[in-house]
Image (cartoon, helix red, strand yellow):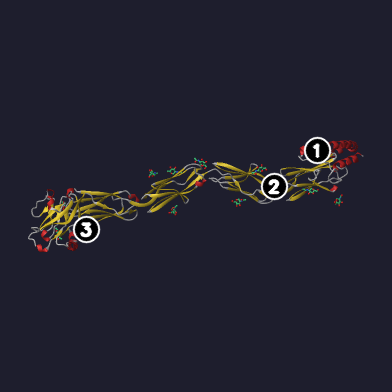
Amino acid sequence: MKYFYKTLPVLCVFIEGLLAGPWSAWMPEHIRAFEGTCVVIPCRFSYPDELRPSAVHGIWYFNSPYPKNYPPVVYKSRTNIVHESYIGRSRLLGELNLRNCTLQISRLSPELAGKYYFRGDLGGYNQYTYPEHSNLEIINKPTIESPPEIVEGTEAELRCVVPDNCPNMKPIVTWMNHGALAEHSVYAQVEEESSTWSLVSLLKFLPSRENHGREVGCKVSYANTTFEFDSVSTLDVKFPPRIMQVNSSVEVIHGSQVVLICSVDSSPMALISWLREDEVLHEDLANNLTLYLDNVTHLEDSIYTCVAENIYGRDNHSLALSVLYAPWKPVVNTSVVAIEGEPVTILCSSQSNPEPTITIFKDKKAVAMGVYQNQVALEFDSVTHEDDGEYWCTAENQFGQSSTAFNLTIEFAPLILADSKCTAARDTVKCICAAKSNPEAVITFELPTRNVTVNETDREFVYSQKTGYIVTSILTVQREVDSQLFIVCSAKNLYGTKNQQLQFHHSNSLMWAKVGPVGAVVAFAVLIAVVCYVSQTRKKKNMNESSSFMQTENPPVVFSGDYKGPGNLEKSESKEICSLESH
Ligand SMILES: *[C@@H]1O[C@H](CO)[C@@H](O)[C@H](O)[C@H]1NC(C)=O
Ligand SMILES: *[C@@H]1O[C@H](CO)[C@@H](O)[C@H](O)[C@H]1NC(C)=O
Ligand SMILES: *[C@@H]1O[C@H](CO)[C@@H](O)[C@H](O)[C@H]1NC(C)=O
Ligand SMILES: *[C@@H]1O[C@H](CO)[C@@H](O)[C@H](O)[C@H]1NC(C)=O
Ligand SMILES: *[C@@H]1O[C@H](CO)[C@@H](O)[C@H](O)[C@H]1NC(C)=O
Ligand SMILES: *[C@@H]1O[C@H](CO)[C@@H](O)[C@H](O)[C@H]1NC(C)=O
Ligand SMILES: *[C@@H]1O[C@H](CO)[C@@H](O)[C@H](O)[C@H]1NC(C)=O
Ligand SMILES: *[C@@H]1O[C@H](CO)[C@@H](O)[C@H](O)[C@H]1NC(C)=O
Ligand SMILES: *[C@@H]1O[C@H](CO)[C@@H](O)[C@H](O)[C@H]1NC(C)=O
Ligand SMILES: *[C@@H]1O[C@H](CO)[C@@H](O)[C@H](O)[C@H]1NC(C)=O
């Protein structure tokens, strides 16, 4: 009752302002009470002062202001006859003479909910039903008021509002299922609105995402009664997304299908996106989002991020997808032609996951190797002609291997090979000069004693053939009995010239030593005769042999010391020698 008194001055001012006309009343437009309890409807009324009635009476009607409609009588001061629903339930607390029409209704039941009208009866015709009325609402649940939004980590306050308009039944409000709420506290206060009163219990707490969906209750009871009313409110806690489950970094084999799942806890639902680097691959408003990658290749080998976002915040989680594949065909990127003596570096590279082992082979021997490297260097401080040749670069990992062949070409100055020599036989001398070089050497024979230099252009005396980097030239000259024949072979290319005097191998010198001087003279005479015959026939034969041997149209020919220039030299010279020797 304390609060009734407290607000009285305010009420008086209010009533004075409101009771403007001579016939007017004031009562709360709307008043609420729990079923089974009571309600006091505060009421004031006025009438013209000049009436000065001897007695003031009053009637409370239910749901209609018009007596003609015979509305249920809630209270009647003249007769005390009331509608059966109100027998023993209604009581006028106000003093009508003091223009106080305050009404109490007890043991409320749902059918008593409705509009209550007051009619003043001042005698005679001075009866008037005031249009102002009170609408009584009978409830059986307290009202739980939630703030517009409950955000994780920000203190929230729930209000349980209970009408408190029955002076002899004071409500007791308790909260239910609130024990787990963090930092909760309960505080009660009385609130007044238009002279109706409410007991408000405030539950303060610090919401967490775990509280989302939790049912919190408010219960109203009254001392010494069994009345109990309660209601439940489901907490809608807003919180930023949190990624609860997502794949960790994985290794997958080229060509396989990959499924990545991101599941999120969020309120409200988050926009979930799957990103590769910064590119959005898939996004949706959902609780979880699955990313499917078909037939993965090295292009899918990347960092993947799941990002979840709502208006309260965002979360992300990244993972690495490693796609395993066999090495690609190795690539040799360096020019592979070099000059002898130069430093050379050849790079062979490939790509694979895991990194390949790259090996460079020459003649089946490994010459360079790199383990778990995508590039290997074959390095020479100074290449030699022996490094020339075919190489293989092979890249390998557990998923396969791949190879590339390449040629290293070395350019080098001529070398005259050991089997270069002259062989004297019968009446001819045959000299072989073999030179190895790159590019191909030009071989020249010098005969200083005969003041002659010949090369391949003199096809009548020299022919050449080439096998790989080796050029072999053969010089055929007619032997002179007396002359000290010595022959120099010269091989030349753009990198240098090599000269070498060719050694003679006298195939028949040993024989002369064995048969002695006499025998030798006899044998020599016989030999001359035979040689002259044979040499004539051999000349023809040689032409046939040579065509198959050296694949050149010009066969080797006998050459005499008296050089007379090209032309029909051959015939005349051979005749000359034979005629000379036969003397
Ligand atoms: C009217 O009567 C009630 C009950 O006695 C009392 O509580 C209230 O204060 C009165 N109202 C005024 C305005 O005097
Ligand atoms: C409730 O009952 C007890 C004893 O029966 C009494 O002492 C107490 O005052 C009552 N409380 C109310 C609010 O009526
Ligand atoms: C990702 O996780 C899901 C669920 O745990 C699983 O089914 C899927 O195979 C995983 N994906 C990969 C690539 O490991
Ligand atoms: C993902 O969400 C769908 C629909 O929201 C649900 O049916 C499914 O069970 C969820 N999967 C996981 C792994 O949470
Ligand atoms: C996978 O990709 C390769 C190359 O793009 C293609 O040849 C093959 O058909 C694809 N396989 C599947 C199952 O899509
Ligand atoms: C993921 O979160 C980190 C830290 O909050 C942030 O720096 C990064 O930019 C986020 N990544 C993406 C793709 O949103
Ligand atoms: C070979 O590759 C290396 C490294 O990638 C590069 O520096 C070099 O210039 C390349 N050489 C050629 C001939 O392309
Ligand atoms: C290397 O040289 C050989 C002989 O000349 C040739 O058969 C082969 O095709 C060459 N290889 C490459 C990769 O050029
Ligand atoms: C060689 O020829 C040169 C000039 O062509 C000449 O001077 C020299 O005498 C000749 N030598 C012989 C031995 O014929
Ligand atoms: C071969 O010798 C002739 C003259 O004897 C000369 O003109 C020619 O240039 C020489 N050829 C080569 C390839 O040296």
Q: State the image coordinates of residue 375 (x, y, percent, origin top left).
A: 58, 48
Residue 524: x %, y % from top left? 89, 37
Residue at (79% x, 46% y) in the render: 457
Q: Which residue is mark 1?
A: 543
Q: Element under label 2?
A: helix
Is label 1 in contact with label 3 (beta carbons under 8 Å)? Answer: no
Task: Give the SS element for disc 1.
Answer: helix
Measure the C-alpha gap from mark 1 to mark 3. 139 Å
Specify whether 184 is left or right of 247: left
Q: Dot 3 corresponds to which residue? A: 192
Q: Is 265 placed above or below 523 here?
A: below
The answer to whether residue 446 of the structure is visible from this angle is no
Please report contact status of discs 1 and 2: CB closer than 8 Å, yes or no. Answer: no
Tell me the element at label 3. Answer: strand
Q: Upstream in the sequence, badge 3 or badge 2?
A: 3
Q: CA distance from mark 1 to mark 2?
A: 37 Å
Rendered image quadrant of residue 576: top right
Which of 42/518 is in front? 42
